[in-house]
Image (cartoon, rainbow, N blue to C red):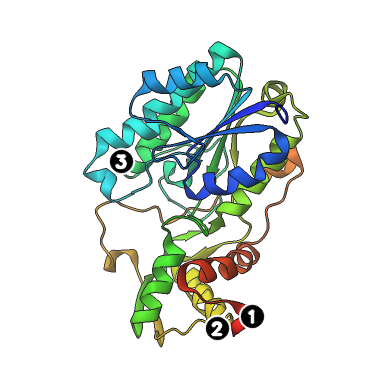
Amino acid sequence: MSAGPRILLIGSQGQVGYELRRSLRPLGDIVCTARKPAAGELAIDLTDAAAVARTIREVRPRLIVNAAAYTLVDQAEKEPDLALAINGTAPGAIQTAANDIGAAVVHYSTDYVFDGSGDSPWSETDAVGPLGVYGTSKLAGERAVAEAGGSYLLLRTSWVYGVHGANFVKKILTLARDREQLRIVADQHGAPSSARVIADVTSQMLAQARGDFGKLMRDRGGIYHLCCAGVTTWHGFTQSIVERARSLGMELKVASIDPIPTSAFPTPARRPLNSRLSCRRLQHDYALFPPAWQDALDDTLPPLVAQEFDVRPDRA
């Protein structure tokens, strides 16, 4: 017997998708899909828009949550067609198919749709101007969803990390374990946001629908920014990661974490210097206030270091 309205979760094996499997459970009967599905999940290929539409018609969910994305920012410069297919074309196909069956959609985007100028937090109505292929592909997805119309929530996030999947936190801990010195960019500003916070706030937004997701999104839909509170740099984030990991008993070799400008660390894709996102619309419309990025890091690190590095606080 169904536990409630059927929810199709696309990208259940990703960082945010992994957390959504838990956080969405009280809201309905979840059908999970992934490019490489686990047992009991459905396979889905986001490069095949027709197949995506078929899956949606077959499952016939009341709500679709698309947590899948092409997230390799530098590799996207070499694979623009693939990035655009997954991040740009697929969201439009999902929204169109959802409209055909009367379903609502949640889709995630990124701070990289902005050009990173200035030092003020970006609002949902600010002009966009992505600097690279990744941001351009995500912006194309936003526009495809909006052009398809219907009921949708489009949630822009920033600097995502989590217990599951590859991310900046795991990379830093691996490097800090093996190297005495780290050189980290200190002039890009934003809010590190844990996948758990993103998933939990998404579910808290959807819980306000009381089962009628379409009405919720007709009344309070469109674009919202969803990230942790506060601002730091990649350098400041790294310092906090190392400090907290050590307090959990992780043995790290690193002795110095040196700040460097973006210009000293060239990458194939340009990164925005200002990734600050204003969450005032989320706070006003949904009365939801994501936690400080430091608190989210404190919650994420214990299970992360236990799973990835076999470090457990009760052994420290």
Counting from the top left corner in percent of width and height, residue 241 is at 51, 73
Residue 246 placed where, x, y %?
53, 82
For disc 3, the marked residue is 133
SS at circle 3 = helix
Residue 291 lies, with reference to residue 215, above or below; the image says below
Does residue 35 show up?
A: yes
Q: Categorize mark 1 by other alpha carbons within 10 Å: few (<14), some (14-19), many (20+).
A: few
Which numbered disc flags the more N-terminal residue, 3 or 2?
3
Residue at figure coordinates x 48%, y 60% from the top left: 189
Mark seen at residue 249: 2
Residue under the image location 54 percent in, 48 percent down: 18
Q: Quadrant of the C terminus?
A: bottom right
Could you say where residue 41 lies in the image, as x and y percent from the top left? 50, 36
* Of residues 301 and 254, the one drawn nearer to the viewer in this rendering: 301
85 over 267 or under it: above or below: above
Gap in Å between the C-alphas at discs 1 and 3?
44 Å
Residues at badges 3 and 2 in contact (C-beta under 8 Å)?
no
The secondary element bearing badge 2 is classed as loop
